[in-house]
Each structure stands twice: as structure tokens, then as C-alpha cells.
Amino acid sequence: MRFGKGSSVPPMPRAKRVFDLTFTLLTMPLWLPLLIVALLLVLVFTGRPLLYISQRRVYRDQSARIGKVRVMVRNAHLIANRETVPITSQRFLNLPLDSPIYTGVGRLIERFDLTELPQFFSVLSGKLSVIGSRPLPEDVIASLKEEFPRAEERFLSRCGLTGPVQLVGRQNISDRDRLELEIGYATLCVNRYSMRMDIMLALYTALILARIHPPLTLAEIHALMNRWASEPMHLAKVTH
């Protein structure tokens, strides 16, 4: 599935953009100081560059340059990518925290989930949403589509900093279950957006990051998504 100019897919609701701007600006006194601290740690312990910039698919056919706090060695994208890392049980490229490609301070930053903080600026510019599937490089998308032809449908809504998958944990979910959850959320955003959904997903993200609430199971997030939605969410079955 591609989303060209003639696509009949409805546009994203204005309410989602309102949520993105309101949430990002209201929480700026929290995330901006944390971002400054993370960047200073990188500068002191590993030096420049402070950010890792890469081209990622963010929404339907749109790609954008997305920044992260640099937590890996320089030129990590040349060492670990979907062509150099053998495909085992997952086609998503999830590198474990004990991988030697992480720097020492990078592991600390990643452990406290500060890596994605620069992307709040991408939310302000409209490239990303607060809630959504994670943006992906095209080589990972191509790898996913080899096994799951419907993988493109995760881009029906704009990608985000966090979403239902992050409440379960990327390492705790299979590719198929992750895509079903992402496609279900994206479809809901297009057809029956609920601001309450995004508010609750953001709240649970904060509680889990602060270690106040444990990560959710896949069954729990399915149940909660149906409770938060303005009407029940029917998860898309992703098959080979």
C-alpha cells in the first residue's frame, strides 16, 4: 500500500495536531532540561556530534530527517543496519542495550529513555506526532514488507515519539503483534480519532518511564485501547 496524491485515505483530524502542540508546549519545562543534560553528557564523555540524524519514513509517503541524542559510536548506521545485521526472529532492528555499538554514556541515556527527546522539535514543526508508530528507515520497511505486505499501513497516521508498542516494550513483542498494534492505532486515528486515546497513551508512557507502573502486557494494551477508543478498535490481522 502506497499513499500517493490520488489516495482516498482521509486526512488526519485537526484534533490530533491540537493535542500534539498542546502537550509538547505544556511539557517543555520537563523535557527541555532533560535534553540539555543528555546533550551535555554526550559532549563531555564522547564528544561531537551530539545528535544522530537520519532519514526516516514518518507519514504515508513522506520522509524527513529525524534527530536523536547520539548514544552509539560514530557512524553506527554503517555498522548496524538491516543489511549488515542478520535477520533472526525480528525484522525490526532492535539492538540490545548490551551491544558494543552503544557508548558507555549512551547506555545510561538510553536506559532513562532520553534518546528521542530532540524529536519534540519535530513535533512542533509538524513532521512527527507525540503518539504514533516509530519512524523507520526504508531498508527496515522493505525487510518488513517481505514477510508482512501490510506493513505500510502503520504509516496511515503520522509517526510519533511513543505509542502502544512502547507500553509493552519493543523487546517483548513479536513483529506480527507489533504491526497489528501499530496498524490498529493508525487506522483508529484515521477513522475515529480519540484525543482521550492519545492522552492516556502519553500518561501511561510517563508512568512506565518513571517506574511507577510496570510495562503492560499485549492483552492489557488491547483491552485498554478498546476502553479508551470512541468505539472499539478492530486490530488488523497481519499475515505473511
Image (cartoon, helix red, strand yellow):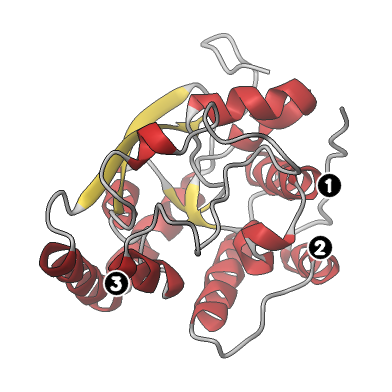
| Residue count near mark 1 (Cα–Cα under 10 Å), binned few <14, some 14–19, many ≥20 | some
Alpha carbon of mark 1 to alpha carbon of mark 2: how far? 9 Å
Location of the C terminus (image quadrant): top right
Q: Position of residue 65 (x, y in %)?
A: 30, 34
Left or right: 130, with 181 as reference point: left
Would you name the residue on which mark 2 appears? 222
Would you name the residue on which mark 3 appears? 31
Would you name the residue on which mark 1 appears? 235
Q: What label sits on residue 205 in the rendered view?
A: none
The answer to whether the residue labelled 1 contacts the one labelled 2, judged by CB atoms less than 8 Å apart, is yes
Which residue is depicted at the point 36% across and 74% down?
Answer: 108
Residue at far top of view: 6
Alpha carbon of mark 3 to alpha carbon of mark 2: how far? 28 Å
Which residue is depicted at the point 40% across and 27% down?
Answer: 63
Q: Is residue 66 above or below residue 222?
A: above
| Residue count near mark 3 (Cα–Cα under 10 Å), binned few <14, some 14–19, many ≥20 | some
Which residue is depicted at the point 68% across and 46% down?
Answer: 182
| Residue count near mark 2 (Cα–Cα under 10 Å), binned few <14, some 14–19, many ≥20 | some
Which residue is depicted at the point 48% across and 50% down?
Answer: 160
Left or right: 103, with 113 as reference point: left
